[in-house]
Image (cartoon, rainbow, N blue to C red):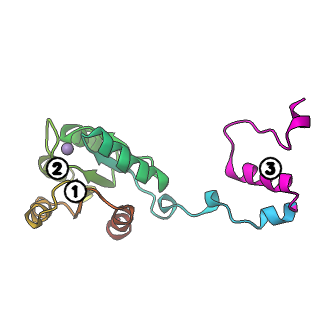
């Protein structure tokens, strides 16, 4: 019997509270101590505070992974468009509150997609934030002139994404 060999036997996936409990049990720590220990999973996520439907429009696989991972950690379940044309189409069929939009994409670029979406949705348009490799002042101005609310240059910091969510939604 495995139970004779090990202090605790657990099945994967192991949830952090269960793992913590097993470790503390193994170390002989009182159970009352366990319940007083703050656990990460109980922290308030940004998505709880600001519930939003977020769309990521990005053609680069690595960049897709990066931004999607950051947003999921905040508790969001973002949709993904691989180019501007897909972004326009997703906005027609779904309620989107916020778009993180790459500029250079095949089929339709970010600036054109932004203008198309705002043309179709008017006052109901999602907030559109450029997420681009261009860090020049002119590029930022170009994005704002096209109707985007903000411009974040890549590589972005998680705090910049959070700031946008807190400021524009
Ligand atoms: Mn691109």
**Residue that badge 1 annotates:** 130
**Residue that badge 3 annotates:** 22
The image shows residue 72 at horizontal and vertical percentages of 46, 50
Mark nearer the N terminus (2 vs 3)? 3
Magenta residues, as a range?
1-30
The image shows residue 21 at horizontal and vertical percentages of 79, 53
Q: Quadrant of the C terminus?
A: bottom left
Q: Are marks 2 and 3 in contact (CB under 8 Å)?
A: no
Instruction: Identify the residue shown where x is 67% and y is 61%.
Output: 39
For the question of whether residue 46 can be seen, the reply is yes
Q: Which residue sits furthest bottom?
A: 167
Instruction: Identify the residue shown where x is 85% and y is 39%.
Output: 6
Q: Residues within 10 Å of mark 1 (few under 14, many from 20)?
A: many
Tell which tag, 2 or 3, sits nearer the viewer. Answer: 3
Does 153 lie within the magenta span? no
Distance between the alpha carbons at the discs numbered 2 and 3: 49 Å
Q: Quadrant of the N terminus?
A: top right
SS at mark 1 in the image: strand
Instruction: Identify the residue shown where x is 86% and y is 61%.
Output: 29
Tell which tag, 1 or 3, sits nearer the viewer. Answer: 3
User: Hey, which quadrant is residue 133 in on the image?
Assistant: bottom left
Distance between the alpha carbons at the discs numbered 1 and 3: 46 Å
The image shows residue 65 at horizontal and vertical percentages of 37, 43
**Residue that badge 2 annotates:** 103
| Labels in figure, total | 3
């Amino acid at each position: 019997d495995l139970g004779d060999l090990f202090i605790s036997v657990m099945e994967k996936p192991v949830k952090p509270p269960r793992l913590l409990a097993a470790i503390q049990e193994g170390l002989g720590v009182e159970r009352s101590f366990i319940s007083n220990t703050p656990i990460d999973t109980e922290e308030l996520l940004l998505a709880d505070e600001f519930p939003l439907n977020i769309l990521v429009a990005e053609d680069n696989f690595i960049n897709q992974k990066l931004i999607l991972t950051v947003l999921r950690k905040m508790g969001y379940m973002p949709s993904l468009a691989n180019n501007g044309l897909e972004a326009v189409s997703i906005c027609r069929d779904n309620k989107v509150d916020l778009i993180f939009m790459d500029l250079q994409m095949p089929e339709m670029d970010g600036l054109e997609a932004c203008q198309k979406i705002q043309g179709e949705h008017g006052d109901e348009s999602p907030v559109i934030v450029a997420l681009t490799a261009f860090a020049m002042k002119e590029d930022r101005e170009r994005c704002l002139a096209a109707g985007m609310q903000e411009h974040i240059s890549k590589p972005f910091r998680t705090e910049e994404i959070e700031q946008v969510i807190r400021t524009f939604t």
